Amino acid sequence: MKSSHLLHKVINIFFDLLAIVIASLAFYITIPIYSPQETIKLPKGSVTNTIRYLQQQGYPLSTIDTYLLVAIGQPKSGELKIGKKTMSRLEFLYKLTSATEAIDVITLIPGETLPIFLKDLAKKQHLNIDKLNQSYEQFSPYPEAGILPDTYHLPKGIKEKNLIKFLVNFTEKRYKDLSQTHLQHYNPKEWQRYLTIASIVQKEAANKAEMPIVASVIYNRLKQAMPLQMDGTLNYGKFSHTKVTPKRIKEDKSGFNTYHHTGLPPYPVCSVSIEAIKAALNPAKSDYLYFMKNAQGVHDFSRTYKEHLRNVARAKHHSK
């Protein structure tokens, strides 16, 4: 009887202690946690390392949270979108395992030049412009047009080297696929010539429909050893948005001045879209040598200089 009474007493004590633990735990998990920023960056590693890292960042966590997090699931790594707010402890720990990765969205538009894009990228993403340039030179085989115009979704906080490496590798894969499809091989030196032609098409064509026709004018002029005489080639590098004036044409002594030099510029003048590349690979069949923008904002194409002068006169008349 005494042993039975003792066992009963021990059981009661156990359940009393369990009730105290449960009550304490219930109170503990209601203690709110404030996230002072929208995102939180977690390192790769065990649950213990995650809790320790967050403690070092000032979050009021304890060993109890380690066990709670183990029960909830494996925490993610990288920069996570937590939300800048006060939340329950369980909500906070759950977000460590379920929050979506914080991303940055960057866009390179067709026709923009590398210096302008990298400068804008450095400013918006708070990156080092010199490191961006160095990384581009390291990874891209092309002085320009080594990054395909597109909208990219990237992990927040990505560093300069990894960012450029990703953009260049993505572009190189697309270039290789296009080249294999249209040429049955991929040679960077040969491909740069197509990119250069495509970049001029990108700068000069009023729309996608015109691209193959503009490409045909370029090829026709090259075939006859005529200077290309296209303004778009002077909008290279830092001159991307600079108006091409007679003074600029006279003073620019670079190989990009196709009024003074025959042949193609030394390399692409800007980023190029897939449509512009396809136009360079498959130009329209024409004997056009000239084009002039008309009142509708598209181009009138002509075969002779006399015909071209009439288009110029018509355009000037409509612009008055």
Image (spheres, grey):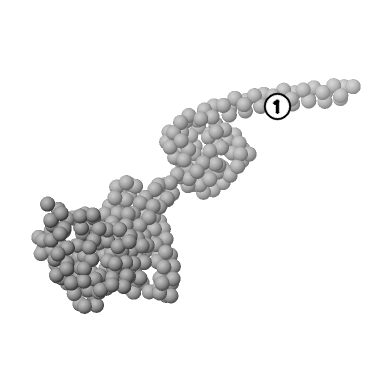
Image point (40%, 52%), residue name = 152
Rendered image quadrant of residue 260: bottom left
Q: Is 303 situated above or below 160?
A: below
Q: Is 55 situated above or below 237?
A: above
In the picture of the structure, the residue carrying the numbered disc 1 is 18
- Indicate left or right for 300 with 20 as reference: left
- Indicate left or right for 197 with 248 as reference: right
Q: Amino acid at mark 1?
A: Leu
Image point (60%, 42%), residue name = 73
Residue 160 visible in rendering: yes
How far from the left and from the top, in percent, is residue 170? 42, 60
Secondary structure of residue under mark 1: helix
Image point (43%, 72%), residue name = 180
Q: Is 50 situated above or below 1?
A: below
In this view of the protein, which residue sits in the foreground, 23 or 145? 145
In this view of the protein, which residue sits in the foreground, 229 or 249? 229
- Indicate left or right for 154 with 91 as reference: left
In this view of the protein, which residue sits in the foreground, 153 or 249? 249
Q: Is 289 situated above or below 158?
A: below
How far from the left and from the top, in percent, is residue 100? 50, 43
How far from the left and from the top, in percent, is residue 56? 47, 38
Residue 49 visible in rendering: no
Quarter of the image with the N terminus is: top right
